[in-house]
Image: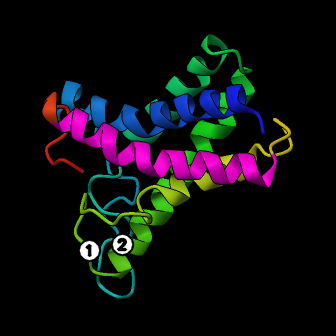
Amino acid sequence: MQPVVILQLLGLLMLANGTPVIATKLLGARYSYPVDGNLTFPDGRPLFGRSKTIRGVVLAVLVTTAGAPVIGLRWQDGLVIGSFAMAGDLVSSFVKRRLNRPSSSRASGLDQVPESLFPLLACRSLLSLTLADIAVCVAMFLIGGVLISRLLYAWRLRDRPY
């Protein structure tokens, strides 16, 4: 197991997933164009929902790419992690819309697993991750996500404590 790499990855995963939340608080509705262009799926529900914005995706990827060298990883690693974290976030939003869950609603596990698993699998060979590394990192992200979300709510960076 690689504890240092796991901590680096957790830092980047938190950066990727936290950047859109902070951007929303700082920028409000400015530049927040929905990723899905307000399209609906054949089931009549939004494709991803209004909370998934181009601004959030782009900023998450850029900030994660820039943050990787700061914590000892290559910018390319940050690019992969940020991109796949956002892909996982979009997949979880897509599934939540199919389950008729409203935008920004809580779905423990579904909210954290794709956002962490997709980037970890994508950089598995880049960082020589074992399945144990990936499992530990996903579990820590799942637990940490719940705890950090409550802190962000207490600091008024989130509108809900999840």
Q: In which quadrant will I find the N terminus?
A: top right
Q: Which residue is mark 1?
A: 101
Residue 14 placement, left or right of 146? right
Q: Residue at x 17, y 38 (%)?
A: 153
Residue 137 placement, left or right of 127? left
Q: Residue at x 62, y 55 (%)?
A: 117
Q: Are marks 2 and 1 in contact (CB under 8 Å)?
A: yes
Percent coordinates x, y for residue 157 in the rendering = 19, 32
Q: Quadrant of residue 150?
A: top left
Q: Which mark is residue 93?
A: none
Quick check: is 138 in the magenta stretch? yes
Span shown in magenta:
130-153
**Mark 1, residues whose alpha carbon is within 10 Å: few (<14), some, or many (≥20)?**
some
Residue 55 placement, left or right of 134? left
Q: Is residue 53 visible?
A: no
**Mark 2, residues whose alpha carbon is within 10 Å: few (<14), some, or many (≥20)?**
many
**35 above or below 64?**
below
